[in-house]
Image (cartoon, helix red, strand yellow):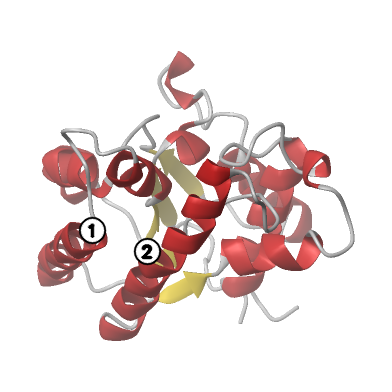
Amino acid sequence: MKDLCIKSGQSVLFIGDSITDCGRRQYDGCLGDGYVDLFTKLVAAEYPERKIKYINKGISGNTIVDLEERWTDDVLSNKFDFLSIKIGINDLHRFLNEREEAVPPELFEKTYDQLLERTRKTFKGPIVLIQPFYLSKESSETLRKKVLQLLPKYLKVVEKMAKKYKTRLVKTHEMFQKHLKYRNVDVFCNEPVHPNPFGHLLIAKELLNVLSK
């Protein structure tokens, strides 16, 4: 593994949905018990001499539109050296379920683009985008099949934003699909959206790999 690009004295802000939140709102300063917390532990184990500050602003149920509404307060008003964004699966589900607050791929792209453009006006540091994922194999089950068919549109948006704004990219769906070739789905989750501790560990490990290239 190459050296982690986050140095001692720097700070990282994570923002996203329930997978980032993972119970972090229990008390002020809590990082939750998901990939964010596990990432900090992996870093501490590998680089014990580095003192890094971590901020978790994930909120369960959020879409990219929700992030836009709180972007100034939860992102731009904070001081940080690295920004991590993980969003998209709620956007897909609300669009698929034809809910009033649906976020189709076109709106997902437009809003994501606007957020990153706003951010780049004041923040010139590294950004990492984490793609949404769906922990399921090809299925004849109607909903899961529809999700797997629609998901690539959202993945392409995140990949497009990463290229446009020259950010790092964590391809979590691709990573999980590789693991599903060797292990059953229930090794990583109880249902397709929310990973168990092992699933979160894989996300944290992949994030560490991407930030160490």
Residue at 47%, 15% in the rendered image: 26
The answer to whether 57 is drawn above or below residue 106 in the figure is: above
Secondary structure at numbered mark 1: helix
The percent coordinates of residue 194 (x first, y second) are 59, 36
Q: Nearer the viewer, residue 67 or 143?
A: 143
Residue at 24%, 74% in the rendered image: 124
Mark 2: few/some/many CA within 10 Å (<14, 14-19, 20+): many
Q: Nearer the viewer, residue 48 or 24?
A: 24
Q: Does residue 168 appear to the left or right of 36 in the view shown?
A: left
Residue at 63%, 69% in the rendered image: 174
Q: Quadrant of the C terminus?
A: bottom right
Q: Does residue 65 appear to the left or right of 89 in the view shown?
A: left
**Can I make out residue 71 in this image?**
yes
Q: Quadrant of the N terminus?
A: bottom right
Can you identify the residue that label 1 sits on?
108
The percent coordinates of residue 110 (x first, y second) are 14, 65
Q: Are marks 2 and 1 in contact (CB under 8 Å)?
A: yes
Determine the image quadrant of residue 175.
bottom right
Secondary structure at numbered mark 2: helix
The answer to whether 105 is drawn above or below residue 61 in the figure is: below
Determine the image quadrant of residue 178.
bottom right
**Can I make out residue 130 in this image?**
no
Can you identify the residue that label 2 sits on?
154
Q: Does residue 84 appear to the left or right of 69 in the view shown?
A: right
The answer to whether 4 is drawn above or below residue 164 in the figure is: above
Specify the amino acid type for callout 1: Phe
Distance between mark 2 and mark 1 Cα atoms: 8 Å
Specify the amino acid type for callout 2: Tyr
Residue farthest to the right, as pictured: 182
